[in-house]
């Protein structure tokens, strides 16, 4: 029998989410998360994955996974520091370091985990963190976990950052100060102003931390936002995920030898949570190999993003100010946004509505994630469904 207090908490809060239109329904996929997906017996054009380069379903990754399962088994069997580190983990870390143009890399079980691990391994309650107000939830949680004072700055507002950095430094209250930002902001597709952030950081002696979950495999010939701006030797922490463009699962920190050495000694998910399984690591290695050899998928991703953006904008939709293939379609009102997404679904397009509190009130949007795996015909079909539903709902 469970506690009355718990039952009441759950019923009240679940009901509240339903009343506010924030109750999320999960539609399980009946096959892979590719350019099209199968849900409840229907095939839909998929614009909701982070599988930017289509590598999640690539035969080279699948073959590498199968081979690794047969050679190394299904699980790693232990945490990295006991005996869960296989030669595959080391190979991936060395490859990622070369790919990111840094001295070393440490791999974690997820991108989320990475932020929980890395921030609290170096920051504590005597420190302060300057954090962009639109940073990802895992950064926010990582900052909280560290116990450091979090000081939010207005989104990509360099005057605000400079002012807050100066005040934090001059207060003399903190041992260390970090500035932390997403490389690419996934709700709008805009890119962090890293050259200015680095200048401010150098002026006020800030530790620099860039979570490039959405920039890796997309910008800087795949190496990410930091490389895109030519700042590889001026950023302390580069976070990447292995779950988006790389197409598998996991996360990593790229940085100096000494930083990675410290994280291997002191970051808790590395010490206390079992290592990623061999199949996933082998698939990641195959994926990085592909990215290091060939820019074709990245070019295809950008061409698809440019096409979708220009077509939706031609139809009269507001696609915001994205600088990357992420293509938001800003509808505004939350209920209309949900209805629009539902109508797209009925017409054969899977594109999720994103509403408050994930984005500010009144800026509800459909977030379209075109990938390299979409064909031009698929995207043309998407555009014609957008046109039909947009006209039907008097949005264009
Ligand atoms: N950081 C950012 C900026 C992200 O967008 C995400 C994924 N939504 C993560 C971290 C977490 O990555 P993962 O899915 O690999 O845990």
Image (spheres, rainbow, N blue to C red):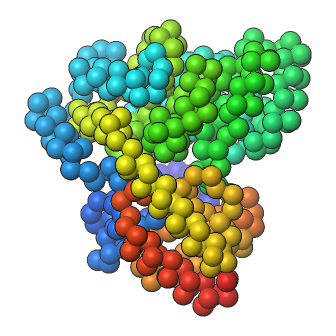
Count of numbered circles in the view: 0
Instruction: Residue 338: tell me if it is visible.
Output: no
In the displayed structure image, the side of residue 335 where residue 81 appears, left or right: left
Q: Residue 312: name its quadrant.
A: bottom right
In the displayed structure image, the side of residue 268 where residue 5 appears, left or right: right
When the figure is inspected, residue 337 is found, relative to residue 150, above or below; the finding is below
Foreground residue among 33 and 292: 292
The C terminus, quarter of image: bottom right
Residue at the spot 19% in from the left edge and 39% down from the top edge:
64
Residue most toward the bottom? 392
Q: Residue 327: name its quadrant.
A: bottom right
Q: Residue 165: name its quadrant.
A: top right
Report x, y in % for residue 385.
Answer: 49, 82
Residue at the spot 11% in from the left edge and 30% down from the top edge:
71
Report x, y in % for residue 149.
Answer: 75, 26
Report x, y in % for residue 103.
Answer: 46, 15
Report x, y in % for residue 390.
Answer: 60, 83
Foreground residue among 134 and 117: 134
Residue at the spot 32% in from the left edge and 37% down from the top edge:
293
Residue at the spot 36% in from the left edge and 34% down from the top edge:
292
When the figure is inspected, residue 217 is found, relative to residue 106, above or below; the finding is below
Residue most toward the left? 70
Instruction: Residue 362: tell me if it is visible.
Output: yes
When the figure is inspected, residue 355 is found, relative to residue 262, above or below; the finding is below
């Amino acid at each position: 029998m469970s506690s009355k207090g718990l039952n009441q908490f759950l019923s009240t809060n679940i009901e509240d989410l339903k009343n506010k239109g924030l109750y999320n329904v999960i539609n399980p996929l009946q096959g892979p998360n590719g350019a099209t997906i199968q849900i409840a017996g229907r095939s839909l054009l998929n614009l909701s994955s982070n599988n930017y380069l289509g590598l999640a379903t690539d035969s080279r990754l699948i073959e590498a996974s199968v081979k690794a399962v047969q050679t190394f088994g299904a699980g790693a069997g232990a945490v990295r520091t006991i005996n869960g580190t296989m030669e595959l983990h080391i190979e991936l870390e060395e490859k990622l370091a070369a790919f990111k143009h840094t001295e070393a890399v440490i791999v974690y079980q997820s991108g989320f985990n990475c932020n929980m691990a890395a921030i609290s391994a170096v920051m504590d309650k005597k420190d302060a963190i300057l954090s962009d107000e639109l940073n990802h939830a895992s950064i926010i949680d990582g900052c909280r976990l560290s116990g450091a004072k979090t000081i939010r700055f207005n989104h990509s507002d360099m005057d605000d950052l400079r002012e807050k950095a100066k005040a934090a430094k001059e207060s003399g209250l903190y041992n260390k100060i970090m500035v932390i930002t997403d490389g690419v902001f996934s709700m709008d597709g805009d890119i962090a102003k890293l050259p200015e952030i680095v200048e401010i950081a150098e002026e006020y002696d800030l530790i620099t931390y860039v979570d490039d979950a959405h920039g890796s495999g997309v910008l800087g010939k795949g190496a990410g936002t930091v490389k895109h701006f030519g700042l590889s030797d001026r950023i302390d922490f580069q976070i990447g995920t292995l779950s988006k463009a790389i197409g598998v699962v996991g996360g990593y920190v790229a940085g100096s030898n000494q930083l990675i050495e410290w994280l291997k000694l002191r970051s808790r998910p590395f010490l206390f949570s079992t290592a990623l399984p061999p199949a996933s690591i082998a698939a990641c290695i195959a994926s990085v190999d592909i990215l290091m050899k060939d820019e074709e998928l990245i070019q295809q991703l950008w061409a698809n993003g440019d096409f979708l953006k220009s077509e939706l904008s031609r139809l009269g939709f507001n696609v915001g100010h994205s600088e990357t293939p992420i293509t938001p379609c800003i509808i505004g009102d939350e209920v209309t946004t949900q209805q629009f997404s539902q109508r797209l679904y009925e017409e054969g397009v899977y594109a999720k509505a994103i509403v408050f509190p994930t984005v500010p009130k009144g800026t509800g949007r459909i977030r379209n994630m075109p990938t390299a795996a979409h064909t031009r015909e698929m995207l043309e079909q998407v555009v014609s469904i957008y046109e039909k539903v947009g006209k039907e709902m008097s949005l264009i």
